[in-house]
């Protein structure tokens, strides 16, 4: 069961917009497993990062159709969540002082 929570979170999304959300509103953005629900993602974030999650907003994205010459393919579908953390809690993805 412990390894199952690590499968729910795929990676953090580190963009300029997500960095502003972290600085201004204490929110973090993750790409998660498309089959994971909000409760599973909340539990995984709280257990892995030892923080208190107040709210989760989730968004599903369809994979774009891409062409290479005459062949068409599709990128995979994915899910993004924005987690609002309790005041005072933080997740730092960058190492300091290097």
Image (cartoon, rainbow, N blue to C red):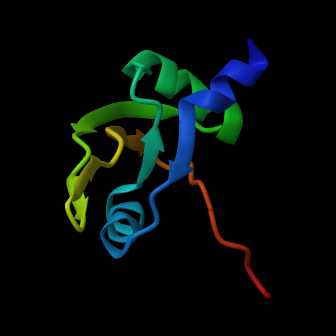
- Looking at the rendering, in which quadrant would you find the N terminus? top right
Q: Is residue 20 found left or right of 91 in the rendered image?
A: left
x, y percentage for residue 2? 76, 19
Q: Residue 11 location in percent, x, y?
A: 55, 49
Q: Residue furthest front?
A: 70
Residue 61 can be seen, yes or no:
yes
* Residue lying at 41% horizontally and 55% vertically, measured from the top left: 26
* 95 vs 6: above or below: below
User: Relative to the observer, which residue lies in front, 69 or 33?
Assistant: 69
Is 88 positioned to the left or the right of 94 in the image?
A: left
* Residue ID at (33%, 57%): 25
Quarter-of-image position of residue 50? top right
Front in this rendered view, residue 47 or 65: 65
**Residue 76 placed where, x, y %?**
36, 42
Q: Is residue 13 left or right of residue 25?
A: right
Quadrant for residue 81, please give it. top left
Count of numbered badges drawn on the protein = 0
Q: Residue at x 57, y 54 (%)?
A: 90
Residue 86 visible somewhere in the drawing: no
Relative to 51, residue 29 above or below:
below
Is residue 18 positioned above or below 86 on the image?
below
- Residue at 44% x, 21% y is 36
């Amino acid at each position: 069961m412990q390894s199952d929570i690590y499968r729910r979170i795929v990676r953090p999304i580190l963009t300029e917009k997500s960095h502003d959300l972290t600085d201004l509103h204490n929110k973090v953005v993750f790409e998660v497993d498309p089959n994971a629900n909000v409760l599973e993602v909340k539990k995984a974030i709280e257990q892995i990062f030892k923080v208190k999650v107040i709210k989760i907003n989730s968004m599903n994205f369809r994979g774009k159709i891409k062409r290479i010459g005459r062949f068409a393919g599709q990128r995979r579908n994915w899910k993004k969540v924005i987690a609002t953390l309790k005041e005072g809690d933080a997740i730092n993805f960058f190492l300091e002082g290097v």
